[in-house]
Amino acid sequence: MHSNVTLKEKKEDFFNMGKYEIIGEKIPNLPWEDRPKGSSDIVWRYSKNPIIKRNQIKRANSIFNSAVVTFNGKFAGVFRVDDKARSMNLHAGFSDDGINWVIEEEPINFIQQTRDPLISEYKYDPRVTFIEDRYYITWCNGYHGPTIGVGYTFDFKEFYQLENAFLPYNRNGVLFPRKINGKYAMLSRPSDRGHTPFGDIFYSESPDMIHWGCHRFVMSAGLTGWQSLKIGAGPTPIETSEGWLLIYHGVLLSCNGYVYSFSAALLDLEKPWKVKYRARSYLLSPQEYYECVGDVPNVAFPCAALCDAETGRLAIYYGGADTVVALAFAYVDEIIDFLKEDGVKYE
Ligand code: BMA
């Protein structure tokens, strides 16, 4: 059954009570915990992290880098599950409170809506974005190397797969939550076959979610240490009066390997390839045990953020050490102020 949710019902143009306007849905039941007393962190962790443990379902070796959205007044998501054969796949999951999740044992079986069957050697790092009438899923799809897989669902029961957005090699495909200048819009990060030792973010647009073009450069790795090697878009960008708030991950190459942290940037609303502000400092870097110890140490990798437009509260879902899912909180206003104070401003 297809849901009849319309853009109007889902997204109420709402002027929030804070400093900046946020265009988005109200989420009165957003998962939330106040900033710990004495902390001045702009992004703070949930005290009961990790919210999803590595062996929460029978077949899992690890569950991490996963994406959640609001769904019928509750929450649904698409989870990265690496199984005990170490195959990487996507599973649907549901939650009443955004914290306690029931993840399906079986991977999502995408119904192909492609010209002819499209192989997916693996699927990982999903993002989920509600646009118009459905939930789109983008992920890193194994097709002769990593590229951007695209699919959609109305109900998190039946999932449909479209053509890959790009040629290999590419990762971190993230859709904007509305058409921009009449076109679907996506950020992605062209790469190579392996553990890409480089990577910049680009913008592309499409009239139909199948044919992508008008590619524009957005921003490079570099600028500061935590983001010196490569960067990639994280959650679906959030529309605000100051621009699109993009949370993105950055990678530093230490003498002990890669370190994945995340921070934020503001992109122009109508020309999102134009960066307005970009953080010098990270907002969260791997420091807690579940971020530093696991299958891949020192990784905090965000794939989703729920934002309540009324209060400006943000719940950020990120993978810890390629092993578990963790949750962190922030206020959109404070991240924007942080960007204006700490960030580099571009004309
Ligand atoms: C990236 C992706 C992510 C992963 C990260 C750290 O290249 O594969 O899924 O979290 O490496 O291993």
Image (tube, helix red, strand yellow):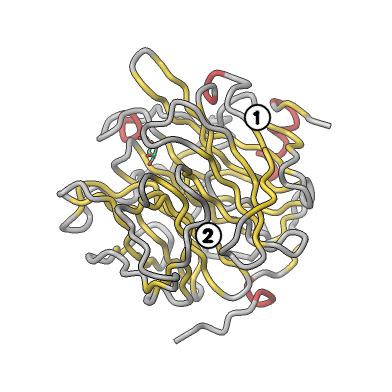
The furthest residue to the bottom: 1
Number of residues whose C-alpha sits closer than 10 Å to that of mark 1, classed few (under 14), some (14–19) or many (20 or more): many
Three-letter code, disc 1: Ala
Question: Where is the C terminus found, in terms of image quarters?
Answer: top right
Q: Residue at x 70, y 54 (%)?
A: 239
Q: Kindly give the residue lying farthest to the right in the view shown.
A: 347
Vertical order, 118 against 6 (above or below) = above
Q: CA distance from mark 2 to mark 1?
A: 26 Å
- Answer yes or no: is residue 315 visible: no
Q: Are marks 2 and 1 in contact (CB under 8 Å)?
A: no
Q: In the image, what residue occupies the spot 44% across and 77% down?
A: 155
Q: Is residue 21 left or right of residue 185?
A: right
Q: Whereabouts is ligand 1, in terms of quadrant? A: top left
Residue kind at label 2, given as amino acid type:
Leu
> Would residue 84 be found to the left or right of residue 140 on screen?
left
Disc 2: which residue: 30
Q: Secondary structure at mark 2?
A: loop
Quarter in which the N terminus is drawn: bottom left
Residue 206 in which image quadrant: bottom right
Q: Position of residue 346 (x, y in %)?
A: 79, 30
Left or right position of 9 against 77: right
- Which element is circle 1 on? loop
Q: In the image, residue 78 lies at what x, y percent? A: 39, 60
Could you tell me which residue is drawn at 38 percent across and 66 percent down? 95
Residue 184 vs residue 62, the one in the foreground: 184
Say whether residue 197 is visible. Answer: yes
Instruction: Tell me: is circle 2 under 8 Å from ligand 1.
Output: no
Residue wearing tag 1: 279
